[in-house]
Structure formats: C-alpha cells, structure tokens
Amino acid sequence: MITGFFTSLTTKKAISIIILIGILVFSNGLFNNFIGDDSSQIIDNVNVHSIINIFSFFSGSTFYNGAQQGLVGIYYKPILSTFFSIIYTLFGPNYSAFHFFQIALHIINACILYLLFKRFFKNSLALILSLIFLTHPINSEAVFYIASMQDVLFFFFGVLALWMIESFQSSKVFLLANFSLFLSLLSKETGILFLFTLIIYMFMFKKKYRYSQLGYSIIILCTYLVLRIHAVGTLTNPVGPIGSVNLFERILNMPAILSYYIKIFVFPLNLTAFNSWVSPQVNLNSFIFPLMIDILLLSIIIGFGFVLYKKYFRQYFTFYLFFAIWFLLGIVMHLQIFPLDTTVAERWFYFPIVGILGMLGILLEIFYFDTKNKWSLIAIITILVLLSTRTFVRSFDWRNQLILATHDIKLSPNDYNLEAIMSTELINQKRYKEALVYAERSVKLYPYLGGYNNLGVIYLHLGKYQKSKEAFLQALKYGDYIYIYDNIANLSLIYGNYNENKEFVKKALNKFPQDYRLWTDLALLEYEANNFNSAKEAINQAYHYDQSTRTVFLYNKIMNNGH
C-alpha cells in the first residue's frame, strides 16, 4: 500500500505531506514564550511596534537603545525588523503570532526545497530529503527561537530565488529572483551565501546567463555594502569569548566546530541553544580527535566524488559537486574565520544541511534507493519518526527562558550566556542569593555588560550598595546602554553623594535627553535636596516624554510641593 502511494506521488500530494507533518511536529512551539534576544529586538524595541517606522530599520541595526536614541548594534537586518514590525503591528506582543509565521516560513522553505530537489532527484527521493530538512532537530532552534527568524527568512528569499531561476526562463522572473536575493541579504548577512551559490549554479547549469548573474550579484553586493556601512559602519567583532581571541586561536577551534555540527547532524540528542566554549590549546579531546573526524568526513566526500567522476554519468558528478560546494560554503562561513557571537549554533546549519542532503540524495540515487523496497521504506520512516519525535520533544525546552536554561546548562555547564540567563530568571523570582552564584560565574567565564548588570541588580537588592555601583560602572565599560544608566540613577536615590549623583544623572541626560526615567530620578534627587524649582523642571521634562501612572503621580506631587 505504501509503495503504491509513492508510485502515485504527485507534487500536490508531496507538498500536502510536508505541510501536514510540519504542523504536527512544530505546532507545540506556538505556546512558547519570548526568550533571550526576543526582548531586546521586539518587546523592548519600540521602533518595531509600528510599521510606520520602517525607514528606521534601514538606517540602523536591530537593537533599541532606549529614549528615542535609535537602533544600535553591529548587524544589518532591516527585512528582519520589518517582518517583526508587521507581525507586532497586526498582533501586538503575542508570541504565538510570531511563532506561527516562523513555523509557516520553515514549512514553506521545506516545500520550495522539495521543488528544487525535484530538479536533481526523482519525486519520492526529493520528498524524503525535504522531510529530513523539515524535521531534523538541528533546525529546531531556527524554528522555535523567534530571534532566529532571520535564518528561516534569509533562506526563504534565497532558495526562492534559486527555484525561480531554475523553473522559469523569462527576464522578468530573472529580475524578480535577483530582487529576492537582495532581500535575503537584507534579512541576514548570511544571505551572501546564496549570491555565491547562484553564481556557481549558473556557471555549472545555465552558462548562458552566468555573466549576467555575476553582474547582478555585484550590483546587489555593492548596494548592500553602501546601505550597511551607512547604517552600522564597518565590520566589528561581536561580543563573546570566540570574538575575543585571535585568528590563530580560532583556527585551533575549527576542528572541534566542524565535528560538533557533524555529531549533531548524525546524533541530534544533546541540543543546546548556547555554545560559547573556546579551546585555544592543542589536546586530544578538543583538537586531535575532532580533526580526525573532520578528515574522515572530508575524505568520504572527496572519495565519493572521485568514484562518481570515474564510474558514473558525468551529470551525477556535477550534481554532487554542486551540493558539496553548497555544504562547504555554508560551513566555512561559520568556522570563525571571521568571529561570530558564539562558537557554534544549531541555527547556523540551516543552510549547510541542504548541501549534506543533496550529496546524500545523489548517493541514494546512484545506489538505487527504491521506495518499492519494504526495508528501505521501513528505514526511512523510522528515521523520520525519530527526527520528528526529537524535534517535538525539544519544543518543550523552548517553553520559556528558565526551562531552556535549566535544561541546557546541564549540557553546557561553562557557558556564560546560560549562567547569565539563570541569574536573570532567579532575579525575577527575587531569589537574589541564588542568582548571585550564577551572575558571579557568568562574569568569571566572560566579563560583559549583561553579566555585570545582573550583579549590580543583585547587590542592590541585597543592600550592598557600593558593590552594586561598582558592578554597574563595570558594565558601562562593555557597552553604553541606557538601562545601565537608569539602574545607576535609581541607585543614586538611596546611596551616594548628592553632588556626584546629580552630576552623573545630568551627564547621562546629555546622552539620553528623552529618557523620562532619568528625568524622574533627577527630579527626585532635587526634591529630596529641597531644590524644588529644579525638581519641578526635571519632572516636567519627565512628564513631557511619559504620562504613565507613576510619572503622573510624581508630577502632581512635586508640582504641588508634596501635597
């Protein structure tokens, strides 16, 4: 019966299967809360709260620095911010809405990939490979983590462009495909991989258009660079341990990085959202053993390529070579030649996995994978069930930030991000002594703004005001973010010298003149010092920028001299 199903498989039926399985596997993710960078890119980012701010997305980065100071950061992803803004404008801070569109995009990507695979493989094999892409747990982070919408988004525009050029011949579609390529690059910097992939595809399969595509790609890249440099400047090393070491030390980590992706692809059991390890020394576990695995993998890839070249139709070798290049392009991009914000991330395999599946498809095609064979079908169904089950189970880990960190920290016990998340969640639960252990460990593993800010908040609630101030000031050495200034200003209301505190708040207001919280704190400082006129001027400024209940209450109290 099942074999007959594959015999009568149509494109419509295959796409229906992809959609149905996608819904079954990922629907539980609709109930997962905002996590990690979701807050700074969406919830606290007032610019994305309305689509009327769309032009600001093209003139800045993805993080909001508060008090109308604009979008900051080192990344340039205006289409991502636009997509967030459209969803927020329509549905507000509804995490289920964001998850719905992210899951839908992933399913659509699998459908387009199936249509592309049909160019290389028979219908049934194209479906199976697409279902592996759809359900593989290594892609779960790209689907369940809203901040990773960038990965499904850049892939959508990139694979759509490739499919359009393969399927249609008109000049209008050619232009539309290149526009889609441009949107891929504006969704995430990794979109540049599709520029290279499409050029290679043209040179290998559509030589008539190769130079035209090369010209379009140059125009797209130059336009992107002009926009990017104007908005965020030149390339800057991201925050993270791997970004703080030199190129030679990053090279020492490359074998472990590649072997990590191989291991998770083959045995996707121990999945973690944060992996910030750095091993700058040559030893058995972190260098020699991973290097042996990598050499074995590359030897297998080259060996099969050589066999195809010598013994089979040249077409098979060409297809295999194309997907091998696809994989190598994707993996080299993430080997830390240029430092990234973490050492490895499952979401970064969203592009390279297609190259692996493509090479696997060629080998299955060569060695006569037959859907009419009962044992072949049992094997592939078993694999798909195992992958789907692991991905479904993983969706529960992404329910909220505390559940995710509690689970993942067991697998990555020395990750500063997970330690910081644990401290943040314990702070929210007012468990400050427990939070202190994680916060101290976080800054010991890697000193950065968020970790020191958590320390400052914890010390503040524990009544250790001097330590709190020192931690906040230390945080400012790693980033000029408004919420650090707000925390120091709040601390100044209960601790420190009046003149020093007043001077600090005024300097902060020079940087963030529209921050009502700073104006409120200045007003309270002046009021407590009996400088009522100055207090009234400050609270009037706060009221101008914010009319919340607390601000209105303080405004009325100060303007009426406390009555």
Image (cartoon, helix red, strand yellow):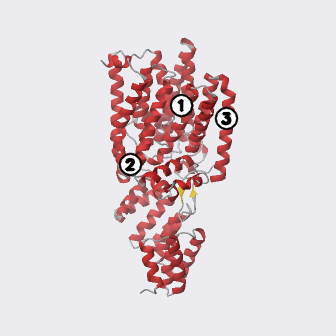
Q: Nearer the viewer, residue 109 or 389?
A: 109
Instruction: In the rendered view, tell whether residue 358 sits above or below residue 264.
Output: above
Disc assigned to residue 96:
2
Element type where label 3 sits in the image: helix
Q: Nearer the viewer, residue 132 or 29?
A: 29
All told, the count of numbered labels is 3
Q: Nearer the viewer, residue 525 or 180?
A: 180
Q: Residue at x 50, y 67 (%)?
A: 472
Q: For mark 3, what is the residue?
A: 216
Q: For mark 1, what is the residue?
A: 327
**What amino acid is labelled 1 in the image?**
Phe
Quote the CA–CA distance across marks 2 and 1: 33 Å
Q: Residue at x 54, y 61 (%)?
A: 65
Element type where label 1 sits in the image: helix
- Which quarter of the image is occupied by the N terminus? top left
Instruction: In the rendered view, tell whether residue 47 sits above or below residue 267.
Output: below
Q: Earlier in the sequence, mark 3 or mark 1?
A: 3
Task: Point out residue 201 in the picture as x, y percentages from the top left corner.
Answer: 60, 27
Q: Nearer the viewer, residue 333 or 435?
A: 333
- Which quarter of the image is occupied by the C terminus? bottom left
**What amino acid is labelled 3 in the image?**
Tyr
